[in-house]
Structures are given as C-alpha cells and as structure tokens.
Image (cartoon, rainbow, N blue to C red):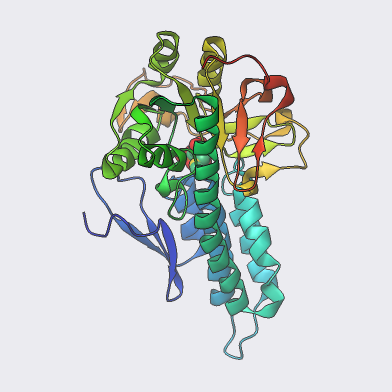
Amino acid sequence: MSAHPTEPSIRWDSGAIIAIDQRVLPHDYRTLRIETVDELITAIRELAVRGAPLIGLAGGLGVALSAHRHRSPDGAVDETAVRSEAARLATARPTAANLVWGVERVLRRLAEGPEAVLAEAQAMIDEDTGANRAAARRAADLLDELLPGRRLRVLTHCNSGRLATATTGTALGAILELHARGRVTEVFADETRPLLQGARLTTWELAEAGVPHRLCVDSAAAFAISRGLVDCVLVGADRIAANGDTANKIGTYAVALAAARAAIPFVVVAPESTWDPGLADGTGIVIEERPAAEVTAFAGTPAAPEGTRAYNPAFDVTPADLITAVVTETRVFRPAAARRPQKT
Ligand code: MRU
C-alpha cells in the first residue's frame, strides 16, 4: 500500500491524470500517473480505470490532457489533433454512456483553450460527487418507502462504489447510506466473473466502511434470493435506454430475473449521465465483448483446454419490466411495466 485510501479515484495533477490502479486491488494500492491519451485508453481497456461514471470523468480529463499536450508556446491549441485523440478515447470501451458524454461535454470548451477544457473536466468531477450523493440518498429513501421499518439484507453485483466514481458510489453509495441509517444487516457481494470486481473491489470498499458482508459466486445469487436471504437488490448501470432498459455488468440480468421471481425490489442507481435518451430501448445498446483469455484462464493460469473458444460479453441488458426503479440525482423513474406486486 503506497497511497491514501480516501483519495479521489481520479484527479488532475500538473499536466497528468492520477488514478487509482484498480487492477491490483485489494492486494496492492497504487496510483497511475497518466501522461498521454494512449496511456489513458490502455488504462480504460485494461480496467485500471473502470466503472461507468469514472470513465466519463476520465474522458473529460483525457480531453484536457490532449489539449495541454497539443498547445503551442503561443497558447494556441491544435484542435484537429485534440479532436482526433478525443474520438479514439470516446470509443475505448463502447457500452458505458458516460464515456462519450464526458468527452463531448469537455470538447465543447475546446475553442476557449486548454484551461477552459480543464475547468470543465474539474467541474464534472465536483458534480459527480454531489450527483451520486443525491442519488444514493434518494435510493435509500426509496428503500425506506418500499421496505419500511426493518433492517435489510442487500445483494449487489460488480462494483458501483467510490472506486467506480470520483468519491461517492452509486448503488454501493446507496448501500453505505442505508448502513449509515442503521438499515443494513448484511450485504451479499457477487464475485462478478470473470474479472472479480465484486470480490476484489466491492468487498474492499465494504470492509473499509465497516459494513457486514459475505462474498458469493455469481451463480449463488439466484439461490440466495430464492431462499429468502435477500430483501432487495441494488446495482449500478452503464447505459440506460429511454424506456429504462439497463446495461450493467454481465450477470445483472440473471439477478433481476431471480429478484422478479421472488418479488423483491430490484433498484438501479446511476447518475443522469448514464441515460441514453436517443435509444428507445435496450436492443440498440452495444455490448463490449472482451478477450477469451479472461474466461479460459484464471489469474494467468489456464482453466480450459488450449484453443477453447469463449463467449465473453462484459455487460448484459436488464429489461425495464424487471426493474422496480431507476434512481438518479434528480428523479425516481419507475418503468411502467414493472408495477408488479412486491413482497414487503
Ligand atoms: O467492466 P466494468 O468493471 O467497468 O463494469 C462496471 C459496471 O458494470 C458497474 O456496475 C457500472 O459501471 C456502474 S458503476 C457506478
């Protein structure tokens, strides 16, 4: 461990981006100093910098980095070079809406020069904390309303905590808010195959916050729900279509099916920047497919016969009719089709 566990997941420092390296947690705590857009693209593709809100912020800072590097001594910016790097950055991973959102928002200030671009990226980081805090409170209020007067056993999938945002998580932020209100008995954290964001990162954050938790393999989630061990599910999101269909880490859909069958609330918590109002429904969401080696090997050790082909989508899409509510910093969206009876 070499740095401070409470520092923001990403920040600007004298012409470079400093980010927590999420590949090496929980065994090591390191920060990366990212000095070029290519280094940032690699960090995003390798999930050193990951989580939809965080890669949106990285997109904004990446444009600032590019604008600073392509500034001539007279202060003029080579806009063509910056736009070309921004286009590559925006497509580093295809599923999270936030990445394109972050890049485009900051690019709008390009004509005003590198400092204006950086100011916009910094503003996004500040807003991220406020937005996620508001969404977390709103989600905790919703759970107070849906499941009043008792302590909750909550299941979550992947990592939607502070590591996936600037400082305050989305779904995991809501879980911490519920914990602060004395409402959490325990959290089930899905391990989240194949890259183990739940095992490596969510448990690390829950331990840091002192929240009782148990880790389970992804395929235990439906069984835990069916046995009545879970009162509600809270997850984050990577892209939400206009009707509420939600892309999130692969395995989320299976959890939603189990939650619907058991009639327990399934709540998505995400900032407004995760919505894609241009998509009528989830069928148009581009799902990233990742290398076979993530599935055919485990921590570098082969787990399948050499040459085995793999199916490795990084995300799935949960249809809106399985979602009790999508909670953001400004609203609680209840997909109309999901108004089914829920156990209280
Ligand atoms: O591949 P990852 O680790 O970037 O996937 C992240 C998720 O699916 C998260 O649940 C989502 O981005 C929400 S994070 C607040």
**In the image: residue 232, left or right of residue 86:** left
How many numbered discs?
0
Residue 333: x %, y % from top left: 67, 35
**In the image: residue 69, left or right of residue 217:** right
Viewer-closest of 263 and 307: 263
Residue 166: x %, y % from top left: 46, 55
Q: Is residue 195 above or below residue 61?
A: above
Q: Is residue 49 above or below residue 60?
A: above
Give the residue drawn at x 61%, y 49%: 98
Give the residue drawn at x 30%, y 33%: 300
Viewer-closest of 74 and 98: 98
Q: Residue furthest left?
A: 1
Q: Is residue 261 above or below residue 154?
A: above
> Looking at the rendering, which quadrant does residue 230 occupy?
top left
Viewer-closest of 244 and 150: 150
Q: Residue furthest bottom?
A: 74
Q: Which quadrant of the figure contains the N terminus?
A: bottom left
Q: Residue furthest front?
A: 149
